Image (spheres, rainbow, N blue to C red):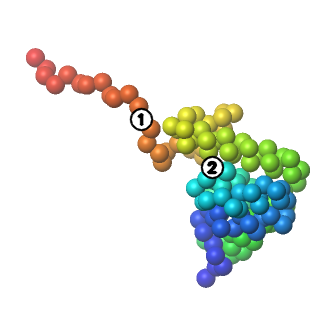
């Protein structure tokens, strides 16, 4: 139906961004595995630039496909490459915070639901206090 559309920006499209902007960063990250923090951070940066969280299968963006949509989003960013790299570095800090036991996100950034806690990863915590077993 639509050309290679996914729910969120896929890491397989990262090499396509290297001809647009931030070339050195994209080339470096494109060689990394998909689960590397820098790959996750670059994907998160593009997800935010392209607005992947508001895309649905009936939208124009979905009809373009992730590759074309992400290229348009990065090429259309009105800031400098340094600002793009700064956004990447912020995303990398968030990914690192998430991977390091789910610590709160830096700079007060919150998820869409307003919670600073990551939802997918289990974090070791103190056991809950034991309730009294007998009511005498």
Q: Which residue is drawn at 69% across and 67% down?
A: 13
Q: In which quarter of the image is the N terminus?
A: bottom right
Vertical side of 130 occupied by 10: above or below: below
User: Residue 56, can we see it?
Assistant: no
| Mark with earlier residue (2, 1) | 2
Q: Label 1 belongs to which residue?
A: 124
114 in relation to 134, above or below? below
For residue 115, above or below residue 9: above
How crowded pointer 2 is (Cα within 10 Å; few <14, some 14-19, many 20+) is rated as: some
Q: Where 61 falls versus 124 (above or below)? A: below
Q: Left or right? Give the position of 11 relative to 78.
A: left
Q: Quadrant of the C terminus?
A: top left
Q: Nearer the viewer, residue 68 or 1?
A: 68
- Residue 60 or residue 90, whichever sits in front: 90
Viewer-proximal residue among 94 and 39: 39
Side of 38 relative to 123 (left or right): right
Residue at 78%, 64% in the rendered image: 17
Q: Distance between the residues labelled 2 and 1?
A: 21 Å
Q: Can residue 27 be seen in this view?
A: yes
Q: Do the residues labelled 2 and 1 touch (CB within 8 Å)?
A: no
Give the residue drawn at x 66%, y 79%: 3
Image coordinates of residue 48 in percent, x first then y, are 70, 53
Circle 2: element type = helix
Query: Residue tagged by mark 2?
Result: 37
- For the point 55% across and 34% down, the residue is 103
Q: Where is residue 92 in the image (x, y as percent from the top left)?
A: 68, 45
User: How many labels were placed on the picture?
Assistant: 2
Disc 1 crowd rating (10 Å Cα; few below 14, some 14-19, many 20+) is few
In the rendered image, the residue lying farthest to the bottom is 1
């Amino acid at each position: 139906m639509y050309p290679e559309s996914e729910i969120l920006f896929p890491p397989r499209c990262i090499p396509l961004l290297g001809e647009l902007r931030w070339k050195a960063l994209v080339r470096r990250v494109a060689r990394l595995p998909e689960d590397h923090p820098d790959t996750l951070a670059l994907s998160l940066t593009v997800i935010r630039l392209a607005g992947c969280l508001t895309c649905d299968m009936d939208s124009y963006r979905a009809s373009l496909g992730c590759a074309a949509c992400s290229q348009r989003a990065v090429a259309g960013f009105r800031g400098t490459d340094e600002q793009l790299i700064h956004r990447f570095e912020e995303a990398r800090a968030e990914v690192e915070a998430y991977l390091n036991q789910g610590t709160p996100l830096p700079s007060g950034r919150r998820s869409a639901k307003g919670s600073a806690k990551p939802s997918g990863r289990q974090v070791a915590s103190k056991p809950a206090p034991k309730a009294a077993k007998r009511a005498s």
